[in-house]
Amino acid sequence: MHGTFTIALVGNPNSGKSSLFNTLTGLNQKVGNFPGVTVDKKTGVSRINETLSANIIDLPGTYSLYPKSADEQVTYEVLLNQKSADRPKLIIVIADASNLKRNLLFCSQIIDLKIPVIIVLTMMDIARQKGITIDTEGLERMMGVPVISVNPRRNKGIPLLKKAIADIYTEAKTPAADDFIDIESLTGKWINEIRELCGLESNYAGLHVACNYNELRHLNAAQRIQIAATLGEAKFHKSKVQAAEIMARYQKIGQIMQQAVVETSPQKRLVISDRIDKVLLHPLYGNLILLIVLFILFQSIFSLAKFPMDWIEQGFSFIGSWLNTLLPNNFIKDLIVNGLLSGISGVAVFVPQIMILFGLITILEDSGYMARISFLTDRLMRSVGLNGRSVMPLISGMACAVPAIMATRTIQNRKERLITIMVTPLMSCSARLPVYTILIALVIPQQRYLGFINLQGLVLMGLYLLGFFMALLVSKVMSIVIKAKERSFFLMELPVYRPPRWKNVGITMVEKAKIFVTDAGKIIVVISLLLWALASFGPPAEMRMVETKYEQLIRQYPAQTKELERTHATEKLEHSFAGIMGHAFEPIISPLGYDWKIGIALITSFAAREAFVGTMATLYSVGDDNAGRTTLHDKMSNATRADGSPVYTLACGLSLLIFYVFAMQCMSTLAIVKRETKSWKYPAIQFAYMFCIAYLSSLLVYQLFK
């Protein structure tokens, strides 16, 4: 029987749960939402044996069954709601063997829910480094459930795990009758009333209903009223019972640890990770190393990507020249060369930089360094009203603001979560990277200092840091304006340092490139084709007038035909629908140093920031005899105003860079902010304050440098 056996993976954060999920499901994965909430549901299909397949649900990581964030609440609901479509028939609890005592607390809570459980021990190599030896058979006997050690990275223990899953399914094993701890002795007989009222399988589930009946969405109003009455009669003291429960669990876990776990030394040996952390988490050296890491990252984006970008540009120039000579001068040639080819080249040329950025970020994350950045910046975050947990969404915002904003669900404090959502789009995402690189290449010279420091790479790093520091400044202002009494605490387990999985890095680079080409590429190509149409056509009367004017001038001055044709193309573009739209917008942006063509690019960028590149490629190609032969960089560097002065001066380029650092130009981000905050008020505030900062900052920069 295939696809009818549902298994949930649960465990503490950084316990190896995601690695096990990827190993079990391979490419048979999909991401959706849990019903009624915006938290991601990661599911996949795993082939257990020749006759059995299972649906695997990767539940959000949590340290205990008592939820403190939106992600943890989802895990809680799925496990307690017996009518949930996602409720598993088997739970695999992933436990970090190097921190077994803390992990067994969560394991014991899951066991008492009376759902079949398998405990999977990960990080056994780290445990051995710490001098910890675990008797898995003894642990299995005392916990009362199967215990299997695995290493998902090396596929060790996976066949044994699949066999245990198949045995539970085929033998229809039921959970152990005995509770891990006696819940009734902590509560009283009234727990049975709640259990019967809600149709629960265990006293422990009854205790959780008693503690959180107002937050559990699957309970009806009548059940809540009866539960409240029962608890009132019993004089139930929630905190007191919870504390007694945790103490009872740790007491029994302590006894199990004494019998099943042996430490070869009374003191834990200082593992390599601890030694490295003494340097990387040092208040002075740690922050200095972080700046060096960022410096190398942004230098690499320019240095490593230069050659593949040049090859791609040369390739498209060759294709453009070939099509120009092959195709006759007509509407179809204009559409293909100036519309379609220009749009595609605007996407393809930046693929190497996107791949390098995501590859380097994956290396930092896979190695365990990314988590250290949260600890390093916690003090800085607290000074602006946030904490270290906000750093991960902000760092994720360097890739894309949409998943970064969704990642704020792990922030327990509601005020801090709202502020993080509001400032995350100030982080420079990958969509801004094509804009940054084309503008930096135009206005910043290719200079090197000390032989290896690239000036363009320094400017790129400065733009990313500028967005980050503006996010901190806005956070400080919002923390003063938004009032809340909640106190926040930042607790996070640091993963051990590991060598990056190069296969994973390669897969991530390819996947992100595919997403950029397919998702962003589709938008850019569609906008490029639409702009080509808007730039090629205009009001019939005006276009006829321009055509007649230049036909007469060419007949009158045949020696100046080439120069007149160039002027004709420019004037035709200005009278097109795109030109009319750009000229209407020009009075608003001219104080920033922008012309009407840049105005059109700013408008199209609200669909996707990277559309700026495709827009420029199309606008500078329409009417250009050399379209397809010259690169976008050459077209933009040769662009002039009506008086003959260059468009992209240092002042204009810097002003435009600053505008793209601060402006909210992403409809998808506004949509996700609305979904996460459940109100249009916050996206509207976000759009307004970011536009004001962008406009005023760009105005100041242009006036200073012009």
Image (cartoon, rainbow, N blue to C red):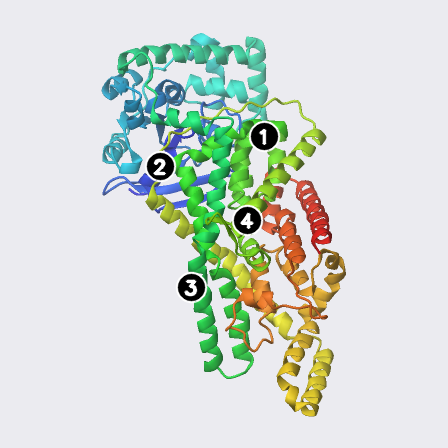
Question: Which residue is at a point 56% across and 52% down the rendered structure image?
Answer: 432
What secondary structure is marked by label 3?
helix
Disc 1 versus disc 2: nearer the observer:
1
For label 3, the residue is 311
For label 1, the residue is 381
Earlier along the polypeptide chain: callout 2 or callout 3? 2
Task: Residue 189: give x, y in percent of width and height.
Answer: 47, 9
Earlier along the polypeptide chain: callout 4 or callout 1? 1
| 621 versus 154 height, above or below | below
Q: Nearer the viewer, residue 506 or 59?
A: 506
For label 4, the residue is 460
Q: Amino acid at mark 3?
A: Trp
Q: Amino acid at mark 1?
A: Met
Q: Nearer the viewer, residue 419 or 103?
A: 419
Question: In the picture provided, is 628 more to the left or to the right than 501?
Answer: right
Disc 2 versus disc 4: nearer the observer:
4
Task: Residue 141: give x, y in percent of width and height.
Answer: 26, 17
